[in-house]
Image (tube, rainbow, N blue to C red):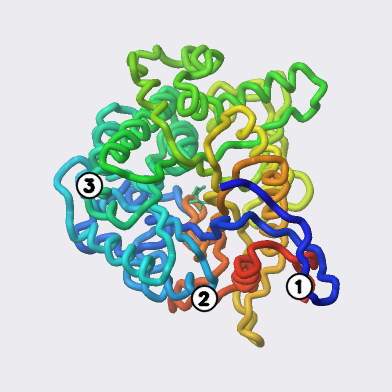
Amino acid sequence: MTATVTSETAEPGGAPQSSGLTFPDGFVWGAATASYQIEGAAREDGRGPSIWDTFSRTPGKVFAGHTGDVACDHYHRYRDDVALMVELGLASYRFSISWPRVRPDGAGPVNHRGLDFYDRLTDELIGNGIDPVVTLYHWDLPQTLQDRGGWTVRETAEAFAEYAQSVYARLGDRVRTWTTLNEPWCSAYLGYASGVHAPGIQDPVSAFKAVHHLLLGHGLAARALRDAGAQTIGITLNPSSVLPLDQESAADQDAARIIDGLQNRIFLDPLFHGRYPADMLEHMARFTDLAHIREGDEAIINAPIDVLGVNFYTPTYVSAKPGQAAALDNPGSEGIAFRKPVGPVTDIGWQIEPAGLTRLLERLHKDYPGTPMMITENGAAYPEGPDPATGRVPDTARIEYLDGHLRACHDAISRGVDLRGYFVWSLLDNFEWAEGYAKRFGVVHVDYTTQERVPKDSALWYRDVIRRNGLDDRSPTEG
Ligand code: GCO
């Protein structure tokens, strides 16, 4: 697809039309969710426990002791949820498969009842003209695999490829787009370094081993999917737009290099260039011998992919600060300060800076060229619920956030970036990991007592964006 864009729209024969932003023909409009965050039915049809079941039951780990036991009850309400997607006019829906539903013991026998659910969901989507985009791992590792070392051991990478094959065997005749991992940065560093996410471990050595075994799992699964005949294979990262606070300062630039290495290049270089960056090998070697990185592994990780998924929420600014303790989720970052958000932030405290997204996409396009990209997540937490008088959910700030980031995507496309689609995070309010149900990212409001869904104003706005394949020139908050 060529990335042609227009910045003017004209109504044939009509009065001069306001200028707007039109996206390329075929640009994919979608919404995203993840299994543990929405499905519920935690003990149904043979599903085994995941690390998030364990973690959310560990006192003090998740806001107010919330768990994904029921979540949005999507497991039972998926038909209604697909009907909502139809109302919004989504072309595509990105969801993840729960590994412990499919292989309750991680590496053991396939649980066909678990696959039945995804089979029904896939048929429901396709029957309604919505293209399914499957993510194989969105953080719900089977607990049995964690008990054997989780992502710190090689066996988990091997088990992941086997699990990927079992899902492909069932859905491969209908699902065209396969994403191996979602945000391995979070799985590795939040799961094993800061311990803010499951499995809640705080050990840099484990985190670096997890980085490698996640990437290896991706490579092994990508190869297995390719051999099985998968059409489009990708991985979703959350690459960060990392900038030195003082662009002129050599010390700040060096701080940015290290954080860019830990958050971006440690994943992107082996994926696209088949080797870890030399400075990151040195960085990791401060903590561990690198015996877990075996001869040939980087070539496996370098398996060709067809699309890079990019999740973006907020940029990162860093500076050199002697004496600063390391941020737990960035092992080895002592002497580096992360700037506190400035300017407008969302309800989760993340700085809003759409230009950071354009910058990031251009950088990825320049340093890792040749692979089309999709925004596989972008969105914002805001608390609004239904107005008792009107029943509407007036989430104006979310509309502004989305409008700004779509303009940033359009800018990137205008500058030559091969961006093929956009998935809003998220279709539904859902279980926001350590924040439980306290943070709402949905364009559809969920009442967790009644499970009633109400499309927010942002959903109606997004429906119009999809209809016109672009943005109009009104400020998003007007009318
Ligand atoms: C993410 C996650 C989502 C989060 C979202 C908001 O990939 O970070 O995929 O599960 O809910 O990012 O934090």
Residue to which mark 2 is pinned: 87
Residue 142 at what x, y percent from top left?
28, 45
The extreme bottom residue here reads 389
Residue 95's place in the image compared with 209, above or below, is: below
Which numbered marker is on residue 166?
A: 3
Residue 273's place in the image compared with 437, above or below, is: above
Residue 313 at what x, y percent from top left?
62, 48
The alpha-carbon separation of the residues under discs 1 and 3 comes to 52 Å
SS of the residue under disc 2 = helix
The extreme right residue here reads 16
Residue 87's place in the image compared with 438, above or below, is: below
Q: What residue is at 76 percent from the left and 52 percent from the top? A: 344
Q: Is 225 on the left-hand or right-hand side of 59?
A: left
Counting residues from the start of the chain, the first of labels 3 and 2 encountered is 2
Q: Nearer the viewer, residue 211 or 277?
A: 277
Residue 146 seen in this snapshot: no
Q: What residue is at 61 percent from the left and 22 percent from the top? A: 258
Residue 396 at what x, y percent from top left?
71, 68
Q: What residue is at 42 percent from the left and 54 percent from the top? A: 133
The alpha-carbon separation of the residues under discs 3 and 2 comes to 32 Å
Residue to which mark 1 is pinned: 12
Q: Nearer the viewer, mark 1 or mark 3?
A: 1
SS of the residue under disc 3 = helix
